[in-house]
Amino acid sequence: MASLFFSFSTSSPLFSSSTIIKPHFSQTKHNNNHLHLTSSPFTVKSIATNSTSSSPAVDNFWEWVSREGVISNKSAGVIKPGIVPEGLGLIAQKDISRNEVVLEIPKKFWINPDLVASSEIGKLCGGLKPWVSVALFLLREKANRDSKWSGYLQILPETTDSTIYCTGQKRSFLNFKELNY
């Protein structure tokens, strides 16, 4: 059985097939404090080999999410993190049934404007655009070596290709309220 790799990547000659599935996130019916995928927003690709590598930061992150209860015993046997040619992703260790929930992110682990507002810097971020307050929160937490978020922050990329950095004509193609500053 080949492993499955879920990513936001382009095609690669290492992969034998791919299917693009329209993203659809929803809260679980049994608990509003979790977010799960009812259909995958990822490209699903079959890797020709089961070998992947990991880094200490990824291993630390996986230990952190397991310790915090994000990765259940059931999920631990189904998926694992790995670094493949396209970057960091989750790799299926067994076949996954359609609509099978393999990972749930508890609401307490959502880094969003509500979390920022309830944090130590919340009052300072009042009136800022939501994405700015979240960015400031992430910067503050990254500078704090004892941050509860350090396991997550260690795996974030140093740079991003976010649409927020688009300028000129490319920016005019985008219609995001968040970019209007």
Image (cartoon, rainbow, N blue to C red):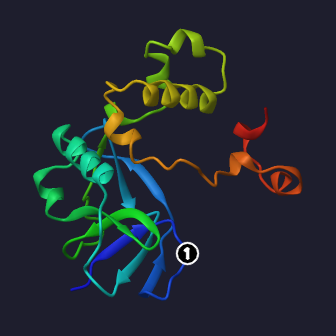
Tell me the kind of residue under disc 1. Thr
Residue 142 spot, x, y in % from top left: 44, 31
Vertical order, 164 against 85 (above or below): above
Vertical order, 107 against 58 (above or below): above
Pick the residue in front: 180 or 5.
5
Vertical order, 43 against 24 (above or below): below
In the picture, the quarter occupied by the C terminus is top right
Q: Is residue 111 left or right of residue 109?
A: right
- The residue furthest top is 123
Identify which residue is drawn at 58% across, 49% down: 159
- The residue furthest right is 169
Q: Is residue 91 left or right of residue 18?
A: left
Residue 170 spot, x, y in % from top left: 83, 57
Q: In this figure, which residue is indicated by the disc labeled 1? A: 10
Residue 122 spot, x, y in % from top left: 51, 14
In the picture, the quarter occupied by the N terminus is bottom left
Element carrying mark 1: loop
Identify which residue is drawn at 25% across, 80% down: 50
Determine which quarter of the picture holds residue 33.
top left
Identify which residue is drawn at 56% across, 26% down: 136
Q: Is residue 139 left or right of residue 57?
A: right
Total marks shown come to 1
Identify which residue is drawn at 50% across, 83% down: 12
Pick the residue in front: 2 or 22.
2
Determine which quarter of the picture holds residue 90.
bottom left
